[in-house]
Each structure stands twice: as C-alpha cells, then as structure tokens.
Image: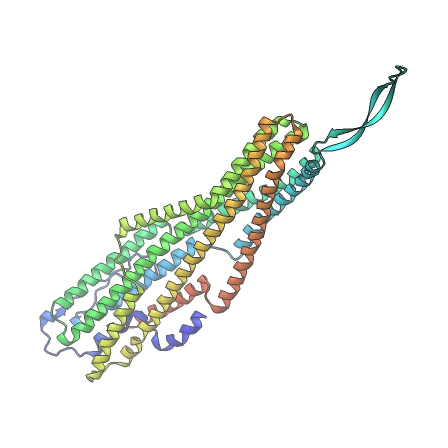
Amino acid sequence: MIWRQTKSRLGKTIGSLLLISFFVGRSIPVCAEASRADVIPADPMSLPSKESGTTSDAKMLPVISGLSRLEEINRQILLQEIALEKHSINYRHYHNVQGRWKGWRYFLSQEGNNVLTGAGLAYQLAERARIFKHPYILSTAKVVVTDKQSGVRTTALRPVGLLQHPSRAKLEAGAYPQMVGQSLGMCGSALELGINAYHRHQATRVGYECRSSIKQVKGYKDNFERLFAERDAIIAGGSIAADDLPAAKAEGKLLRATTTLSLQEYEDFHVNTRRNRSMQDTLYVFDISRNAAGVAGNIVGLVGYHEASGYLSGPASVLVTISGALGALMPVAARGYGKLAGERHRRLIRRTLGKCNVCTMADYDLDRKNLQRLIAQKKERGDTFSEKALTLLGTYEGTAIERFEQEELAQRDYRAGVRAAQQNIIVGGVTGTSKVALGVTGVIAGYGLQTANHRSNDLLVPGTIAYMSGSWLAAADNIRLRVVDEMNRHRLTKQGLMPAQVLAARVKMLDEMDRTLHATE
C-alpha cells in the first residue's frame, strides 16, 4: 500500500516542503556586522484558518534578520500550500461521492430492465414466429356439391387453408414484463439522480459549493503572490550573502513549482469532478426519459391488444422509436455535455484565478534535483548543517514520490473514464438502434397495414428479433462491466491504490507536514 510504502520515509522525512527553508536559514551563520538596513520588520502574516481559505487573526512577527525572515516566509508559503492541497482533496471528496453500493444498485435496476425486456420480447417473438412459420391452418368448411349427372345438390365437409393471426392475449402478456422492466430502470436512474443532488447539497452546506470554493482558492493564490513578492524583495535587497544566493533562488524556484502544481491540481480536480458529475447526471436524465417513453409505448400497446384495436399500434410504435433514439443518443450526448460543463468551469476558474503557469512533474523534479546538487556542493566545501535541516532535506524526495503517485492516479482515472465512455457509446448505440428498428417496423405496420394482420406480423418479426438481441447484449455487457469493476476494486484495494486510499495517505502525510511546520513556529 502507498501509505505503508511512504510510512518508513515519513519517520525520517516529516515536514515535507520546508526542507531548504531550514537549510538556508540554519546552515549559514548570519554576519555579525549586519547593519540596521538588513533588519526587516515583519508584515502581518495571515495564515489559513483550519483549511478553508480564510485567514486567521494576523500577528506581528519579531524583528529578525533578512535570512531568518526568508526562512519564515518559506514556512508561511508551505503552510498555505498544504492548506490548498487539503482544500483540493476535500473538494474532490465532497463532489465525487461514489458509495460502495452505488454500482450494485444501478446494476440491479439496469439488469432488471434488460432481462425483463428481453424476456417479454422473446415471448412475443415465439408467438409471432409461430405464425410466420405456419401462416395457414387446415380447417374444414361445409361446401355444396352438385352431381353433374343427376343435378342433385348435397353438402360435404372439405379441408381448407385459413390465415392465422398472432394471439393478442399472448402479445399482451409479453408486453407486461417490458413495461415493468423499463419502469424499474427509470426508478433506478431517478434514485441515483436524487442521491447525487443530495450529495451536492451536502457539499454546499460544508462550504464546498463550486463558486465559493473558487473564491477560497483565490485567497490562497493572493497570499502566495504577496509572500513571493516579499521573498523576492528580500533577495534583491542584498541581505543574503552572495554564496547563498544560488541556493536561495533555487529554493524559491522549487517553491513556485510546488504552488503552481497545487493550483493546477485544484483546477484539474474541479474541472474533472464537474465534468464527470455532469456526464453522470445527463446519463440519468436520458435514461429516465427513454424509459418513460418506452413505458408509455407499452401502455398504449397494451390498450390496443386488450381492445383488439389495430389503430393504436402506430402511436405505440412512435413512442418506442423515440425511446430507442434517446437510448442511442444518450452516451454521446452525456459525454458531450460533460465536456461542455467541464470547459465552462475551467473558464470560470481562469476568470477568477487567472491562467495558471504551466509546470509539469518533470520541471518539478528538475528543480528539486538542482537544489540537491547545490546542497551537495556546499557539503563538499565543508559547510555544516543542523540535524533538523538534514532531516528535512529528504522530505522533497517523499513529496516528489507522493506527487508522482497522485499524477499516476489521475492518469488512471482518465484512462478508465475514456474506456467506459467508449464502451457505453458502442453498447448504447447498438441497443438504441435495435429498439429504433422495432419502432420503425411498428410504425409502418401500424399506419400502413392496419387491416393486414399477417403482413404486419411478417414485418414485425425482424424488428422484434433486433430489439430482443440488443436487450440481451446490454444485459450481458452489464454483467461483464460489474465483474470487471469488482475485480479491479479487489486488486486495487489489496495494492492500496484505490482513489480513497491514495487520498487518505496523502492527507495523513500533509497533516504530518503541517504539524512539523507549526512546531517550528
């Protein structure tokens, strides 16, 4: 597990991002001849209260040297950075709630829909195929026979062939399971849509509504800019010795990369959660709509069967066609709307926060290694460091590993989302178009062959076969996805790679860093 892998490192590397702030501040003695100009009074520093992005009461720092002031600014930057990371993780947690049994609930409702629909269609197909295969039945009829010689007329029973018609009672019996199945699927999607709305309400109550969250992050970014401006002013003011400037500048560059990655991470978390939730909710709305149209079509068809009215088969088939079209469009429309929602929120973030500077993990790792190289050079020159500075020196390694693991998690989520979307588009397209096939044949039969029952039956047989095949395909694919999901869940849980596990390990590491930084106050 990730936490077990990093726990041994935490014993010697707690405090994460502070590393060089202690190195620079405690490893280089301050010149005793420092003039009064080197003494910079502290500005009031605002620290995040709890984790919310607001600020606590400002407190005046004592008058300290430029180098010590630089160390304090580094500590403040790291505290703000930790609070921002916690905010990002909590935002993702509250807006991406996927309960342990959510997959099973939705699986049962959709599987019930597909199985019952397929069973009802199979029953109707059996009746229609019987007539399709044996259109005529032998019967007897009384006929009048005239003897040619005597002219005497007599009656006799002779075999005749009569056209058969499908049993309306059997067709009606086959429609009931379809109506129940689609009602079940509609209720399952409505339930999940309502649960999502409840979770969204919960997120708003605890302060993680989208716009308020962006405002809180804006407060973090403003604090970063103020602290970095003050840090740059100290370095430019000449209070740092020339030999120490390369390390101080390298540390600043690494701190900027750290804050940039955190802001990028928040933007990605925010956009991805909004895109996924919008896509999911759109799928539910489309599923409710298509099943509602299907249920309405079943009800109209049942009335037609019961009253032996061929004029209702046309309207019923129109509703079936609409339901199938919605099913075919559902995965494409949901994915498209999810992307639009994600881009809308990205523009909203950038209007408030501005466009983040681009920083990759490769850039971050390069800055970290450059700082380590400068430290190694100072050691070769015989410079001494405090034990605390040496301990904190290794924390960048742990932080880098943690960030690489987070990036791997994000990439895995992205790949899984792409695969799921592609599979939904394929299966949804096949199932929807098969239902459209049944609806179109029903429209032709209902409006053009109202009195030609046998010809209508011949036309409806291939449509019924198509939709029945699509329903059973969806049922089989639903089972496959459920099995794959459970296998992946079991494997990732054993490895400690479930998103909740990765984020929980990260929060623990951030808490340890936060406690260490506050202990040095």
According to the image, what is the colour scheme of the structure? rainbow
Q: Residue furthest front?
A: 149
Residue 23: image quadrant is bottom left
- Which residue shows up at 60% across the image and 35% down it? 298
Quadrant position of residue 83: bottom left
Q: Residue at left 59%, top 44%?
A: 184
Q: Position of residue 164 (x, y in %)?
A: 72, 31
Taking the image as shown, residue 248 lies to the left or right of residue 303, namely: left
Residue 127 at x, y = what percent? 69, 38
For the C terminus, the image quarter is bottom left
Q: Nearer the viewer, residue 3 or 488?
A: 488
Q: Is residue 340 above or below residue 29?
A: above
Q: Where is 468 relative to 88, above or below?
A: above
Depth check: give the residue in front, 163 or 191. 163
Q: Is residue 159 visible?
A: yes
Say if 205 sits above or below 156 in the image. below
151 to 430, vertically: above or below: above
Q: Position of residue 57 (x, y in %)?
A: 27, 60
Residue 22 horizontal side relative to residue 208, left or right: left
Kindly tell me whether residue 65 is visible in this rendering: no
Q: Quick one: 33 or 441, which is closer to the camera?
A: 441
Q: Which residue lies at the image location 62% right of the left edge and 45% below the top edge?
A: 118
Residue that appears at 35% across and 72% down: 398
Q: Position of residue 392 (x, y in %)?
A: 30, 75
The image shows a total of numbered marks equal to 0
Residue reaching furthest to the top: 151
